[in-house]
């Protein structure tokens, strides 16, 4: 999988973004891929047009796209990912909100890149486990990607690791 990163920020230079991209690619190669048996490459790409087009995702050169954008959003998330109407995965990292919350944007970008890699369609339900003593019962759970850098300290309690 190739994830295009489009820097639409006026505050983060491409040089700084590229340094973070290299670190995230190392994280994917060394910490994600050996355990999930697949990986990806995050690539810094040039923007097309004035604003991101979330319907056509014209900036995308690979399989998915992440945008670094200044400002905040109405849901109060530092970043999120989903799919457009064509089921093409994309995500946004809101640098203004990261700054307001004193959270490094690089952590949010890493989080969104890993989630986009492990869950590109945005949390599809999956069959999880067989409940003891009821072998015909399977639970439907949300597919979650959890990893050491998740801000949720109780992540392991709430996540099912699906291999």
Image: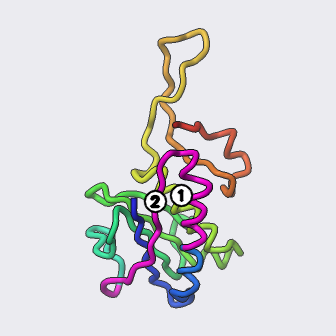
Could one spot residue 122 in this view of the protein? yes
The one of 68 and 74 positioned closer to us in this rendering:
68
Q: Position of residue 160 (x, y in %)?
A: 58, 37
Q: Residue at x 46, y 46 (%)?
A: 123
Q: Which residues are magenta?
A: 22-50
The location of residue 148, given as percent across then percent down, is 69, 53
**Is residue 30 toward the left or the right of residue 58 in the image?**
right
In the rendered structure, the answer to whether residue 49 lies left or right of residue 146 reads: left
Q: Earlier in the sequence, mark 1 or mark 2?
A: 2
Mark drawn on residue 114: 1
Is residue 108 highlighted in magenta?
no
**Residue 60's image quarter?**
bottom left
Q: Quadrant of the N terminus?
A: bottom left
Q: How many angstroms separate mark 1 from mark 2 (CA)?
A: 9 Å
**In the displayed structure, does residue 5 sit left or right of residue 87?**
right
Given residues 33 and 7, the one toward you in this image is 33
Q: Mark 2: give few (<14), some (14-19) or many (20+) Cα within 10 Å.
A: some
Instruction: Return the residue found at the far right.
Output: 153
Which picture quadrant has residue 43?
A: bottom left
Callout 2: helix, strand or loop? loop
Q: How is the image coloured?
A: rainbow
* Residue picked out by circle 2: 40
In the drawing, what numbered circle is on residue 27? none
Q: Position of residue 31 (x, y in %)?
A: 62, 54
* Element type where label 1 sits in the image: helix
């Amino acid at each position: 999988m190739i994830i295009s990163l489009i820097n639409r920020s006026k505050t983060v230079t491409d040089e700084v973004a590229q340094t973070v991209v290299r670190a995230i690619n190392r994280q994917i190669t060394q910490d994600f891929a050996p355990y999930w048996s697949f990986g990806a490459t995050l690539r810094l790409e040039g923007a097309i047009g004035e604003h991101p087009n979330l319907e056509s995702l014209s900036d995308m050169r690979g399989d998915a796209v992440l945008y670094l954008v200044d400002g905040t959003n109405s849901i109060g998330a530092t970043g999120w990912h989903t799919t457009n109407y064509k089921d093409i995965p994309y995500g946004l990292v809101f640098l203004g909100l990261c700054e307001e919350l004193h959270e490094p944007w690089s952590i949010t970008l890493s989080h969104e890149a890993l989630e986009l890699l492990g869950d590109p369609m945005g949390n599809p339900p999956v069959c999880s486990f067989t409940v003891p003593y009821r072998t015909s019962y399977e639970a439907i759970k949300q597919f979650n990607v959890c990893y050491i850098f998740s801000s949720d300290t109780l992540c392991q309690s709430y996540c099912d690791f699906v291999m």
